[in-house]
Image (cartoon, rainbow, N blue to C red):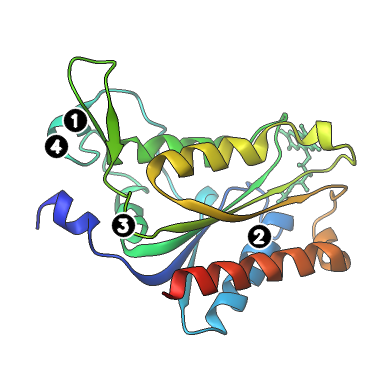
Amino acid sequence: MSPESRTDVTSPRVLVVCGSPRKDGNSDLLAERIAAKIERTSLDAEIVRLRELDYSSCVGCESCRDDGECSRFTDGMTPVYETVRKARGLVLISPVHNYNVSAWIKAFIDRLYCFYEFEYPRPGSWSSRLSGQNRKAVVIAVAEQPDLDDAGFALEAMRKPLEALGYEVVDEVLVLTVFDKGAVSKRPDVLSATDDAAATLARETAH
Ligand SMILES: Cc1cc2nc3c(=O)[nH]c(=O)nc-3n(C[C@H](O)[C@H](O)[C@H](O)COP(=O)(O)O)c2cc1C
């Protein structure tokens, strides 16, 4: 099957990508909660914990221009590409690290570069092989500090690339004032916002 035709195959299924290096931390708990909520609907969900994958960031070799897929690396991201293609729904959850997403989430997003097609000469117009397929996404960022400013641009750093790839971001959740492992469990406001985001994604992804 060519990469182009594979990209056309989407199913009502949600991929939850967790970008925290902390096992059983707050992002992990939210990933599990959102996946469980989605699975209670007609959709199935799969969690990918990026810290468990051995993968490189994109090195900008541009081999994907000729090959239509990342041919530079065979690593932890390789099987994830197929899941990304198939899942109509995507959730990105990142702790806020230095006003931004974690390095794991940044590397994951950069590796999605192989889904782009560029017109030559460059810079010219470009498109995404994930676009036009009714793909929906939710982005969630978890920060320790109470001020909005201390969360920096973590949400935007996930939303903008997902929109460029062809996802409609249907909800976003910014969690502030959370540090200890498990702290989100004691925050009904956070749990409620996460449940709402999961419900919206399930609804939007089902049709
Ligand atoms: C390297 C690093 C950088 C961080 N930078 C920020 C920051 O800029 N703003 C903030 O509010 N919290 C920051 N934090 C705190 C984390 O966002 C916070 O502990 C969060 O709960 C971690 O989520 P987790 O439990 O899912 O790993 C930082 C933590 C680390 C380890």
Residue receiving disc 3: 85
Respond yes or no on whether mark 3 lies under 8 Å from ligand 1. no
Amino acid type at mark 1: Arg
Residue 194 visible in the shown view: yes
Say which residue appears at 42% left-offset and 45% top-offset.
54
- Sequence-wise, the earlier of marks 3 and 1 is 1
Q: Residue 188 at what x, y percent from top left? A: 86, 68
The crowd level at tag 1 (other Cα within 10 Å; few <14, some 14-19, many 20+) is some
Which one is earlier in the sequence, the residue at label 4 or at label 2? 2
What residue did someone put label 2 on? 28
Q: Secondary structure at mark 3?
A: helix
Q: Pointers 4 and 2 in contact (CB under 8 A)?
A: no
**Nearer to us: label 2 or label 3:** 3
Element marked by disc 2? helix
| Residue 170 position in % (x across, y down) | 57, 57
Q: Nearer the viewer, residue 89 or 102?
A: 89
Q: Earlier in the sequence, mark 2 or mark 3?
A: 2
Q: Label 4 near label 1: C-beta < 8 Å?
A: yes
Q: Quadrant of ligand 1?
A: top right
C-alpha span from label 4 to label 2: 34 Å
Q: Is residue 45 above or below residue 72?
A: below
Quadrant occupied by the N terminus: bottom left
Residue 71 lies, with reference to residue 90, above or below; the image says: above
The residue labelled by disc 1 is 65
Question: What's the CA distance linking mark 2 and mark 3?
Answer: 23 Å
Kind of residue indicated by mark 3: Arg
Disc assigned to residue 118? none
Query: Circle 1 — which element?
Result: helix
Q: Which residue is mark 4?
A: 67
Mark 1 to mark 2 CA distance (whole Å): 34 Å
Residue 115 percent location from the top left of the image: 29, 41
- Mark 3 to mark 4: distance in Å? 16 Å
